[in-house]
Image: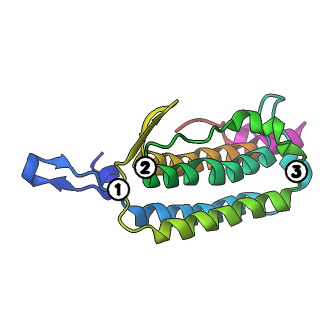
Amino acid sequence: MLLERVAAGRAPNNQDGGAWEKKMNLKYFIERFSRNREVFTGLFVGVSLEQARWRPAPDKWSMLEVINHLYDEEREDFRQRIQLVLADPTRPWPPIDPRNWVVSRAYNESELNPSLTNFLSEREASLSWLRELSQPNWQTSNTGPNGTLTAGDLLASWLAHDFLHIRQLARLHWQYVGAIADPYQTEYGGPWKES
């Protein structure tokens, strides 16, 4: 717990009995978002369109659906909502529908290279915007359908969202190996488990 707080830029405030200050280590988040851009790129290097469109089950997402979801979330959810809450916390947020966008925006019919390029371009725009922030108030909040969220909650959730989809993409690679190796087995390499 202590290491997590230090990594997040929080330090004990001895003046009020050891309470933690509500500071955000923006530099850490910018660095991780930048590195994750490289991770996402690496997860798609050498991936064919066939693999990108492959789903492990009809109700599961493909790699192509994941990268298009990330693109839309980058521009229509996290960055936009942080911008809105910092600029005018009382302004309602535009509605989003990420689960239905997968079908309504036909993610799996997209081409792979433009999809990846779109996401990476939006990530670069996000990084530029984050680097330009000057002492934002991360405690500023907006109350909407998801309850009350601070700008800090949104930034932390955005990075957590990255890691959820990095894990998802890694699992899709693992599942694809099992599918194309048939009749050969992958069990000797180990099962997919939560650590």
Give the CA separation, mark 3 to mark 2.
Answer: 32 Å
Principal secondary structure, stretch drawn in magenta: helix
* Residue density around tag 3, few if under 14, some if 14–19, many if 20 or more, within 10 Å: some
> Residue at the spot x=34%, y=48% of the render?
139
Q: Is residue 147 magenta?
A: no
Q: Which residues are magenta?
A: 175-189
- Residue 182 lies within the magenta run: yes
x, y percent for residue 28: 43, 63
Color encoding of the figure: rainbow
First along the sequence among labels 1 and 2: 1
Q: Nearer the viewer, residue 69 or 80?
A: 80
Q: Is residue 101 above or below residue 40?
A: above
Query: What amino acid type is highlighted by mark number 2?
Result: Ala
Q: Is residue 167 left or right of residue 105?
A: left
In the image, 25: left or right of 37?
Answer: left
Q: CA distance from mark 1 to mark 2?
A: 8 Å
Give coordinates of residue 174: x percent, y percent.
74, 44
- N-terminal of the two: label 1 or label 3? 3
Query: At x 13% / y 48%, what residue is drawn?
Result: 18
Residue type marked 1: Asn
Label 2 environment density (alpha carbons within 10 Å; few <14, some 14–19, many ≥20): many
**Disc 2 target residue:** 151
Residue 8, picture quadrant: bottom left
Q: Amino acid at mark 3?
A: Ser
